[in-house]
Image (tube, rainbow, N blue to C red):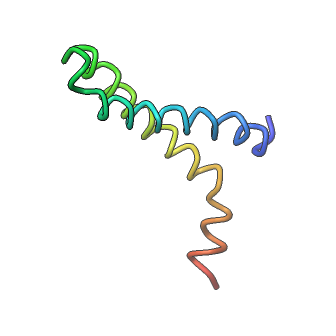
Amino acid sequence: MKRNTVLKILNPILVLFFINQALTVIFRDNISFETFGFFHKTGGAILLCLIAAHIILNFNWVKANYFGK
């Protein structure tokens, strides 16, 4: 699969997990501790993996803009 195709799939999923993190913090008083733990901790671990994949897929851009000549 092409890199751009993977990014088109990865980026919306990344946004959804970011929103998940924000919503679990905002509504932490309204949900049980077990539910919070599952969605926030598990979602956070998945979010970190997605961020790593995003950086790896965009590493040529990172090199060009931050590690110049």
Residue reaching furthest to the bottom: 69
Q: Give percent across and percent down for residue 16.
A: 54, 32
Residue sitting at x 67%, y 63%:
60
Position of the N terminus by quadrant: top right
59 in relation to 54, above or below: below
Q: Give percent across and percent down for residue 48.
A: 42, 40
The image quarter containing residue 46 is top left
Using the image as rendered, state which of residue 21 and residue 50 is in the foreground: 21
Residue sitting at x 47%, y 35%:
19
Q: Taking 66 as reference, is 60 left or right? A: right
Using the image as rendered, state which of residue 52 and residue 38 is in the foreground: 38
Q: Taking 37 as reference, is 69 left or right? A: right
Using the image as rendered, state which of residue 47 and residue 58 is in the foreground: 47
44 in relation to 58, above or below: above
29 in relation to 66, above or below: above
The image quarter containing residue 58 is bottom right
Residue sitting at x 56%, y 43%:
53
Q: Give percent across and percent down for residue 41.
A: 30, 28
Q: Taking 27 as reference, is 3 left or right? A: right
Q: Give percent across and percent down for residue 45.
A: 37, 33
How many numbered discs, if any?
0
Position of the C terminus by quadrant: bottom right
Residue sitting at x 63%, y 74%:
65
